[in-house]
Amino acid sequence: MAITISELIYFLKTAELQNVTKAAQELHIMQPSLSRSISALEDDLGVQLFDRTGRNVVLNRYGEIVQSYASRIINLLNTMQNELDNEKGIGDKTITVSFSSASTHLAVLISDFNKTFPDIHFDILQHNQRELNAFSRQTDLNIFSSSVPISNDHTVILLQENLLLAVPENDPAAKLNDVRLSDFADHGFIAMQKWNDLRTITDYYCKMADFVPQILLESDSPHTVREFIKAGIGVAFVPEITWSEVSGENISLKRIQSPSCVRYICLSWNPTGYLSAHATRFRDFLINHFEEYARRGKPNSR
């Protein structure tokens, strides 16, 4: 068996795109060369890897097995090269961070981190966790939020915070100390956009309270949400610690008695890839300081 690295790379690209022509274009090779490479790999392995339907190809069960191992092999080779470069002092000084939560605090943390490490650069990706594999672009770190605590060998909880309900001062509920979420089934909600982690979490809690929220407006800006609430347009979920800018005049923040509404902001990294010394430093910086930064300017619930 004489499988080459090129054969594995070509196979993986074809499996990803499920089209030989498109794969050849992205790989910048001629289509016949790609076809011969895949045929050679199949001959070496003694199995067909794709089911062919016209111009498209689909992995069969043999192909799925090979894809799993080929991905790990290429990842290990990339990891080896990254670690060698880092050891020689010529490694990439860019840290790639994907996030779907805590954007405001991330900017401040990066700014302060750069005061100590000014030569480190950041590539920031904003995405929906459900639609984009966090490591498909060789992401170093991923910040996201969840309704359940997630902690393992490659994930830590940066912050746990309650979700409050923000209501206009002229709403009858503003006079209450605590509220039940089910009492707001008939209210209009100002919500985050559907791709946002926080929206997923708040929709989940509304489902627990046995209703689907009536969404009047969608916005991914805490400032915009605040202005809509002040205008009396609707109510909104507000993270108690990280959304300090939503508190203020004409807004009353209420603790939700039932169900208990909590979100966890988590940090994860690729468990199978190499994390550079720079990315490791920033990971540890986030773990040690994220909550401290998030609690600056914490709002008072009223």
Image (cartoon, rainbow, N blue to C red):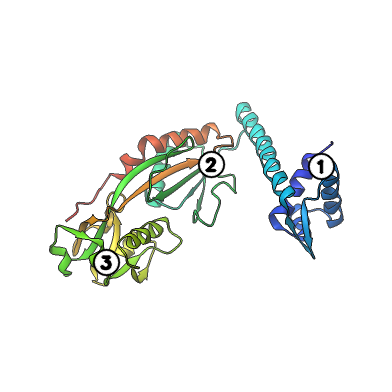
**Could you tell which of marks 3 and 1 lies nearer the N-terminus?**
1
| Structural crowding at the residue carrying mark 2, measured as other residues with C-alpha within 10 Å and reported as few (<14), some (14–19) or many (≥20) | many
Q: Name the image quarter holding residue 287.
A: top left
Residues under labels 2 and 1: Cα distance? Answer: 33 Å
Q: Which residue is mark 3?
A: 235
C-alpha separation, residue under disc 2 versus residue under disc 3: 37 Å
Q: Looking at the picture, which amino acid does disc 1 mark?
A: Leu
Q: Quadrant of the N terminus?
A: top right
* Secondary structure of the residue carrying numbered label 2: loop
Is residue 124 found left or right of 174 in the rendered image? right
| Image x and y of residue 64, in percent | 70, 48
> Which of labels 2 and 1 is toward the front?
1
Q: Which residue is mark 2?
A: 140
Q: Position of residue 20 (x, y in %)?
A: 78, 58
Q: Secondary structure at mark 3?
A: loop
Type of amino acid under label 2 = Asp
| Foreground of the two, 156 or 206 | 206
Residue 157 at x, y percent in the picture: 39, 41
Q: Tell me: 291 left or right of 4.
A: left
As drawn, the label of residue 45 is: 1
Q: Amino acid at mark 3?
A: Val
Mark nearer the N terminus (2 vs 3): 2
Expressed as whole percent of the image width and height from the top left, the position of residue 25 reads: 77, 58
